[in-house]
Amino acid sequence: MIKFGTGGWRAVIGDDFTKQNIQILAKALANKMKSEGVTEKGIVMGYDRRFLAKEAMQWAAMVFAKEGIKAYLINKSSPTPLIMFYVMKHEFPYGMMVTASHNPAIYNGIKVFTAGGRDADEIQTKDIEDYISEIKPSSVEEMDYAEGVKAGLIEEIYPLNEYLDNIIASVNMEAIRQAGLKIALDPLYGVSETSLKTILLTARCEVETIHDRHDTLFGGKLPAPTASTLRTLQTYVVEHKCDIGIATDGDADRIGLIDDKGNFLHPNDILVLLYYYLVKHKGWHGSVVRNIATTHMLDKVAERFGEKCYEVPVGFKYISAKMQETNAIIGGESSGGLTVRGHINGKDGIYAAALLIEMIAVTGKKLSSIMDEIRKECGSIYMEERDYKFTHEKKAAMQKLLMEEKQIPELPEEIDHISYLDGSKVYFKNGGWVIARFSGTEPLLRIFCEMPNIESAKEICGIYEKFLGLEEI
């Protein structure tokens, strides 16, 4: 029952996310490490604020200890990018993070990181699944936690300062200090507050926080920085006259923004803003990488500066791999995850927030004004996104229709070509596109459409709805 998706293994707590399954996964990874001869360094592990997250980390550590592999446990709930940074900086062969990221509160899960602090790719996760298939639950043994600590096989650490100092050293703190900015934070009951406040207060920003308490139910909402979850932050930014509102998802690897006028900025806009800033204002040179369901506005910005945009399947492992291959400046996805050349090899909402604050300080412009500037230079395009639930039978039928029979509905635009790299994506000759694909982290079908105007994007999504017999959630 342990299957990895695009963002690790995620399961409903008490259903498949159980102590037994967590320890089977730990045993499998321990066996994999032994076969690869990489047990000497050990493994680093962390957890977020989800229910049973700390306990799950400890349950896994007890198995590693029994297997003679030292487990370094980050002993406070922490951002996922901290674990990725620590794996990279201290050259661990593997790391683990107990989190289900932006999934509903009934979920928990585990992300596995490989050498360099990268998300485990599909080859690595398939390998782990193969090791899992060979394990009998009765063969999994654990060492008492206290005994593991006493034996030196479990060590509690808290390297947050090392991670934060790395970010502080990479952004223009002096420019931020001189700007006198007022910033509203919304960690969505997740783990970003300590990190973001430390950075921003060091830069002499005025910082105010909402939704900061520990709530494993995330206030009854998804811990994802979306237009619907950030309405309170929007109101707060306007009423308190903040320069910017920043939100992160449950484990702080994704970011959401509210601009100075109280408008929600889509993650696509954040990627465009940062790429534009790094090229135009910081003078960086290089390409950009996006996944197949992320805005083609990045292509327009790249073209504007004589650079190239690369398209990859959904899953940050593909983005980080392509960035390394092409030495790209920035890579990201429409769900809010991004990273920048020279930082970690995965998503980091904390670093992205710091860089956005630097952008406001260095340019001396509001977010809304910078977005207007980009649209004047590169034009505008509009995206419509829709999510749909389905039964097992319905998924099989849609999978057959879209991916095996390769059917599409009759569409009102002239088609350039169709890709099946990840889902079914239709590219139109007017520069627009539409994709239908199954989520790798949730039981959802997602349809994204980007067109020169929002009416066309909505029309095409509606055509797909009827074609597939769907009802939007």
Image (tube, rainbow, N blue to C red):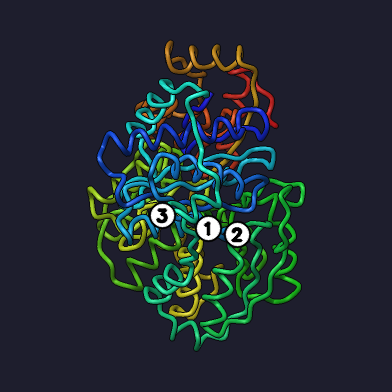
Residue in view at x 68 percent, y 46 percent: 51
Q: Is residue 295 left or right of residue 249?
A: left
Label 3 vs 2, first from the N-terminus: 3
Secondary-structure class at tag 2: loop
Residue on which the image places disc 1: 79
Amino acid type indicated by mark 1: Pro
Q: Secondary structure at mark 1?
A: loop
Residue placed under numbered mark 2 in the picture: 191
Q: Amino acid at mark 2?
A: Val
Q: CA distance from mark 3 to mark 1?
A: 9 Å
- Whichever of labels 3 and 1 marks the residue nearer the N terminus, that label is 1
Q: Are marks 1 and 2 in contact (CB under 8 Å)?
A: yes
Residue at numbered disc 3: 84
Residue occupying image coordinates x 43% and y 79%:
362
| Of the pair 321 and 94, the residue shown nearer to us | 94
| Residue 309 visible to the viewer | no
Q: Report whether 29 appears left or right of 230.
A: left
Q: Is residue 88 above or below residue 13?
A: below
Residue 308 in the image: state x and y as whole percent: 27, 51
What separation in Å lies between label 1 and label 2 (alpha carbons)? 6 Å
Q: Is residue 394 visible?
A: yes
- Position of residue 418 measured from the top left corner of the image (x, y, whole percent): 37, 26
Task: Single out the residue that lies furthest toward the bottom.
Answer: 178
Residue 37 versus residue 167 in the image, above or below: above
Name which residue type carries label 3: Met
Quarter that holds the N terminus = top right
